[in-house]
Amino acid sequence: MTPIIQIAGIIDREDALTAVRAGATHLGFPLRLDVHAEDLTEAEAAEIIRALPRTVMPVLITYLNKASQVVELCDLLGCAAVQLHGNIDVNEVQLIKILRPQTRVWKSLVVGENNFDELKQNLAMFQPFVEAFITDTFDPDTGASGATGKKHDWKISKKLAAISEKPVVLAGGLTAENVFDAVVEVQPSGVDAHTGLEDQSGRKDPEKCRQFVAEALRGFAAGGE
């Protein structure tokens, strides 16, 4: 399959254009969050998504844990994919697929300290009802699960990618400088970056984005999935 290269944390139309021009295959829009503040409104996100080329998939990133709310927001935004970062019951994920069968569901597997067994159980439980998993980093200092700018133990993600029947996307502290090594080591089906591609103002840096995509593709060509 074509590697997934997601640039997340889109804040406006210019941010989206920067990511698209860099070669991203997916753009992540974090909304209805738990810890982090939102960067744009739902109406602004919907407007950006409507203008995206068909070759790029918009992904709702959310902590919502009720199927009805997830489906309602996907419909509002025009998103065909949702990345579930919250503590959601597997029955709610099943219900998303019933209410909106076309939705591609990604379930987060947030790597913390000594929680591989829990992650393995979650992978097995959610696997029949999702299209992909995304591994990310838990920050004990802030309580954030993702968008922390911090790496986790890539060996954990490598183990999860090896046993998963569904694609596993690697996230967590990825940058243009480390994504090649990450892809070669973990052999995921895709990568995701957010804070590591921003400048000091919080906007996506065009050169960082271009280098990230190029280094990710180099990694996949060298030995990733």
Image: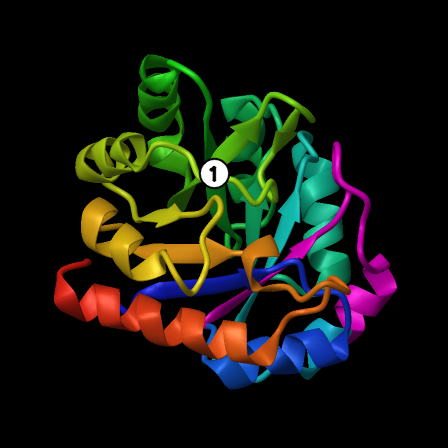
Question: Which residue is depicted at the point 37% across and 49% down?
Answer: 169
Give the residue type that dot 1 points to. Asp
Percent x, y for residue 125? 37, 22
Q: Going by the image, does 90 lie left or right of 177?
A: right
Q: Quadrant of the C terminus?
A: bottom left
- Is residue 30 in the magenta section? yes
Residue nearer the viewer, 54 or 32: 32
Q: Position of residue 19 (x, y in %)?
A: 57, 76
Q: Which residues are magenta?
A: 25-47
x and y, in percent, of residue 185 in the image: 20, 47
Can residue 166 be seen here? The reply is yes
- Foreground residue, 70 or 156? 156
Tell me the residue that label 1 is attached to.
136
* Location of residue 151 with respect to 8 vertically, above or below: above
Using a 10 Å C-alpha cutoff, classify the residue at mark 1 as few (fewer than 14 neighbours), some (14 to 19) or many (20 or more).
many
Q: Quadrant of the N terminus?
A: bottom left
Q: How many marks?
A: 1
Q: Secondary structure at mark 1?
A: strand
The residue that appears at 33% across and 70% down in the rendered structure is 215
Residue 47's image quarter? bottom right
Is residue 130 located in the magenta-colored stretch of the structure?
no
**Does residue 1 appear in the picture of this structure?**
no
Location of residue 154 by image quarter: top left
Side (left or right) of 219 relative to 196:
left
Q: Is residue 138 above or below residue 191?
A: above
The way the protein has been coloured in the rendering is rainbow
Task: Identify which residue is drawn at 48% across, 62% down.
Answer: 6
Out of 100 and 88, give the one closest to the viewer: 88
Query: Residue 104, percent across and down?
Result: 48, 53
| 91 relative to 14, above or below | above
In the figure, is residue 42 to the left or right of 216? right
